[in-house]
Amino acid sequence: MNNNIVDIIKDKLDIVEFIRQYVPGLKRAGKTYKACCPFHKEKTPSFTCSSEKGLYYCFGCQEGGDIIAFLMKMESLSFNEALEKLADMAGVEYKPAKPMTGEELRRAGVRRLLDHAKAFYHKNLMSAGGEFARAYVKERNLTKETCQKFELGFAKNDATALSRDAKAAGYTEKDLKDAGLCVITAYGARDYYRNRLMFPIINQRGDTVGFGGRILGEGEPKYLNSPETVLFTKSHVLYGLNFAGPAIRKSGRAVLLEGYMDVIACHQAGAEYTVAPLGTSLTEEHARLLKRYTDNVTVLFDPDAAGIKAALRGALILIERGLFVKVASLPEGLDPDEYIAQYGKDSFENILNQGQDLIAFHTGLQLDLYPKPLGAQDKTRIVSELAETIGKQPDEIVRREWAKYVAEHVGVDEALVLERLRRPVLQSPFARKQETRPAPQTPVNPAEEELTAWLLRCPQHAALCAQLTQNDFSTPLAWTLFEAVRKAAAETLDAQTAAQKAAAYAPDLKNAIIKLALFQPPAEAEPARDIAACAAKLAHAGMHKRLEEIKRQMKRLGAGNVPQEIFQEYMQLQTKLKK
């Protein structure tokens, strides 16, 4: 690893401003910044980052590290991939100091092959032989410029067209299979896509990771997505987000649609803040992606039973991630691409602006299920159903407003809705249990924690605890942590560098070190005084522990059999502890 390039990148890129691209809700809290963690669900912010230290840490899930670690975790990148992206952002030339790993080489090979396939399909659409596909595109009111922007393509009705072309370019059947572009049969490789309009799937980083194909003419399935590969997990990608990001930030909202063609038509009409999942239900990963760009999402759904159910399910996932959700539908049973073609962008945006808050939408659905006037049992069922939705809202103020709304529209006291919220939700015994990872604790007691945190913050005072030994610490792990920090403090007086060096000395305790490095002392704190006090407390604890060990040893040996040196140590410890 080229340590120099890492240091240059960290100097040029402020970790707080970088993380803010993914976590817009970062707010200053003293010298650090806090927000709800992007890596796990939470209602109270426990994610912290510091420009001064160049580190982030979540006190909830114990994830932590530097700017490189954050990008690796956030976008599932290898070290080299993350460093390459950061170097590009920082305007620094980067050449990997070590060869790529086998997995990195595999991913890079798949990426190149997907780009090759994208160009192959696009050429098919735009050249002789693509007339049938171009006629379909024209029928859907897409311009040539739009086809080029989204790099639409055409897979001919030829079982080996892409395979032959890719092999001629040096790729193997295994390469094609790994990229999700062919299946291997007894007769050799057969293209995965045939007679389909091709939609390259491009992630938010601009990498082609897969394809979607729409059948031209008769056939099933109507839409076919790439199988999952080393680059592609469909629940982790939103179609159109690579183009929509800037428009989402500018407009202050994202709009969720249902399909490729809807997104493309909306972008063509100027509504570039639109994205769509890839034929799958909305997932937490989708919510996390959207949260990087905005706090506001409008879900546009088909007004049939399946569309309503999907909209509600997706909206609940979004609000659990701290997003504010509105729900809207188009009149006359038109798809978004049809509606925007007939009525234009302004009319489309009017529909979006009339969207309902989630609680109003869900309350309306529930009220429509029961005859009027509502009976007591009907009200009980409705409130119970809506309480689950209210309970998923992480914002306490919004939660109370929702409870008030439900009370007014169902015709019950607000106190009854709030009381229902306090009841545990009964779960089916067949429901899948959520896997929860027990939160690892910092392997130190409070005095050890404070001392180690102070040394990371003020390594120049390390001499004040030079006399401490392993016996003064509560566990071997606590001693290992302290030793790593003390060694780092001996090598540098820079707090950020000290944390990085300490993590290198004790990699298994990296997260504990990062957590301690972000320690914020009280205003009245005095580093030298407090470090000395912590060291004295630990030394006192160490003497007491040693005294107890000697007492047990003397008891085992019996009166008259205790060696003189042990008895002398016993007396010395007694004297010191009485001072």
Image (cartoon, rainbow, N blue to C red):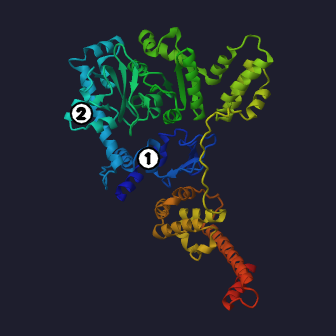
Q: Is mark 2 on a helix, strand or loop?
A: helix
Image quadrant assignment for residue 97: bottom left
In the displayed structure, 208 sits above or below 129; it is: below
Residue at the image position 38 percent from the left and 40 percent from the top: 230
- For the question of whether residue 88 can be seen, the reply is yes
In the displayed structure, 514 sits above or below 340; it is: below
Q: How many labels does the image show?
A: 2
Q: Is residue 551 left or right of residue 232?
A: right
Of 88 and 209, nearer the camera is 209
In the displayed structure, 121 sits above or below 138; it is: below
- For the question of whether residue 354 can be seen, the reply is no
- Residue farthest to the front, as pictured: 186
Residue at the image position 49 percent from the left and 41 percent from the top: 20
> Callout 1 environment at 10 Å: few (<14), some (14 to 19), or many (20+)?
some
Point out the frontmost of discs 1 and 2: 2
Q: Mark 2 points at which residue?
A: 166
> Callout 2 environment at 10 Å: few (<14), some (14 to 19), or many (20+)?
some
Image coordinates for residue 458, horizontal then vertical, percent: 54, 65
Of 66 and 528, nearer the camera is 66
Quadrant that contains the C terminus: bottom right
Quadrant that contains the N terminus: bottom left
Q: Mark 1 points at which residue?
A: 72
Image quadrant assignment for residue 245: top left
Image coordinates for residue 118, horizontal then vertical, percent: 29, 29
Tag 1: residue type?
A: Met
Q: Is residue 492 left or right of residue 471?
A: left
Image quadrant assignment for residue 265: top left
Image coordinates for residue 281, horizontal then vertical, percent: 51, 27
Of 197 and 576, nearer the camera is 197
Tag 2: residue type?
A: Ala
Image coordinates for residue 546, horizontal then vertical, percent: 67, 77
